[in-house]
Amino acid sequence: MKLEQFDGVIRLLPGIKRPERKFSLTEKLKWTVAIMAVYFTLFSIPAFGVSISSLSSPSLQLITIIFAARLGTLITVGISPIVVAGIIFSFLSGADIIKIDQNNPHDRSRMQGLQKLTAIIIAAAEAYIFTATGQLTLISTSVFWLVVFQLFLGALCIIYLDEMMSKYGITSGINMFIAGNVAFSIIAGTLNILLVEAIGAIQQGGAAAIPNAIQFFAPLFFAALVLVASIYAYETNLEIPLVFSQFRGVGGGLPIPLLYVSVLPVVLATALELNLILLFGMFAHSTSPIINFIASYQTAGGRPNLVGGLLYMIAPTFPLPYASQYGGIGGYLQYFTFLSTHTFPLVMPIGTTVLQVTEWIHIVFYTLTLVALCVVFGRFWTQMAGQGPKDLASQLQSVGWQIPGFRRDPRTIESVLNRYIPPIITVGSIFVGFLAAFATLTGAIGSGIGILLTVGIIYMTYRQLEQENLLDKNSPIGKIIG
């Protein structure tokens, strides 16, 4: 498919103009703070006609983290349209349906324009889906279309705030919105849930008061564990020696990090699963055996909850080990009891047979599916971002680098890189998939996936600023880190 045929449509889209000069770190930080202030303003404004209620579904709570959203507010849809558009184009690019020359600025511009157009269309669709499936509690059916319109406008604001952050801020808007949302979740969750539960346990007294209080901080412990594992993974890399062909004795190394594609695979994989949950929520009241075989829902408080089917088997719909008044299950003892005894229905598409499947099957299928999707998205995203062995070999050859002992030929360099990059992409994607699954299953506060993302965002932002030479000793951050 040729992208040129969409040029007319892309030109109709309003855009954010790039700055005419390179900004200093101080200027980037000012823009970042201003954009985040707008984001948190939208984060705090309820959509007119919506009754904001507590989130009882773990999958809905995960949506707020992954999509940097807050249900019931103007940013209910969050960054989901941008992420889903990225998923669509990664598949199209990976399947060679569309061909993109990453070295061609016109091709990159067209791709960005098409992704923005796709994100806007998805924003309209998701605004309708969130409202129509009962994920939001409306004060009256008469405000239905008004709520849809508000959610669409909020999503549109996020799309353009993301573009503005990418051009004027220190990193992409998606990164900053997720990091800000995760930080808010960890602080609010610790103060409003864990600390309150611990104080309540101490006030009850008895010999088990202190052990119970300590147990309530287990989600924070698991969050710290994920944090340490993430930092370790980002610091692990394989270095390929390089020499400069035009100057003898001048050499260096090409670091290939374990997380070569960062945590993007787990973002895309989780986003796909959560969007499927939302999409099939449209058929929550269907009596079709095929639909119920794919996804079975029960309505609680007017909101459809996924309770069975094939989609349930791969979805992160595990309860949270918090007290029930916070939307959890009551503690880790009750949580592990649930995992060992709970069953869910799998309606056969033919006949009336309903299989009761144990929760352990859910754990296995969810973990393996998440890992497999991470590997698939890791490979697709590498090719789409122009970070594959062929692209990297061309970049190295163009600046005069070569691998010692091999000819200075892009094909030779590519063959050497093929020995390392694809396996590392696979291993790194498997690692983040298992780590994300572990975090979800242990109920880490702020969601372990969110912590994994935040560590990756901080690491990538640091590297980006370092490459742009913005961390000089006279800059605000440079003074702090020396």
Image: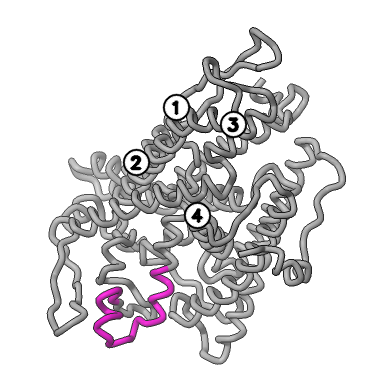
Quadrant of residue 318 in the image? bottom left
Task: Label the magenta part by its dominant secondary structure.
Answer: helix
Residue positioned 54% across, 56% down in the render:
93
Q: Which contiguous range is marked in magenta?
A: 276-296
**Residue kind at label 4, given as amino acid type:** Gly
Q: Quadrant of the N terminus?
A: bottom right
Residue beneath disc 1: 236
Q: Are marks 1 and 4 in contact (CB under 8 Å)?
A: no
Q: Earlier in the sequence, mark 4 or mark 3?
A: 4
Residue beneath disc 4: 94
Going by the image, does 244 lie left or right of 200?
A: right
* Distance of label 3 from label 2 (alpha carbons): 45 Å
> Which label sits on residue 410?
3
Give the image location of residue 60, x and y in percent.
42, 65
Q: Earlier in the sequence, mark 1 or mark 2?
A: 2
**Residue kind at label 2, given as amino acid type:** Phe
Q: Secondary structure at mark 1?
A: loop
Q: Are marks 4 and 2 in contact (CB under 8 Å)?
A: no
Q: Are marks 4 and 3 in contact (CB under 8 Å)?
A: no
Q: Secondary structure at mark 3?
A: helix
Residue beneath disc 2: 222
Q: How many residues crowd mark 3 within 10 Å: few (<14), some (14–19), many (20+)?
A: many
- Vertical placement of 115 versus 9: above or below? above
Give the image location of residue 16, x and y in percent.
78, 58
**Residue kind at label 1, given as amino acid type:** Thr
Q: Can residue 199 be seen in this snapshot?
A: no
* Distance of label 1 from label 4 (alpha carbons): 27 Å
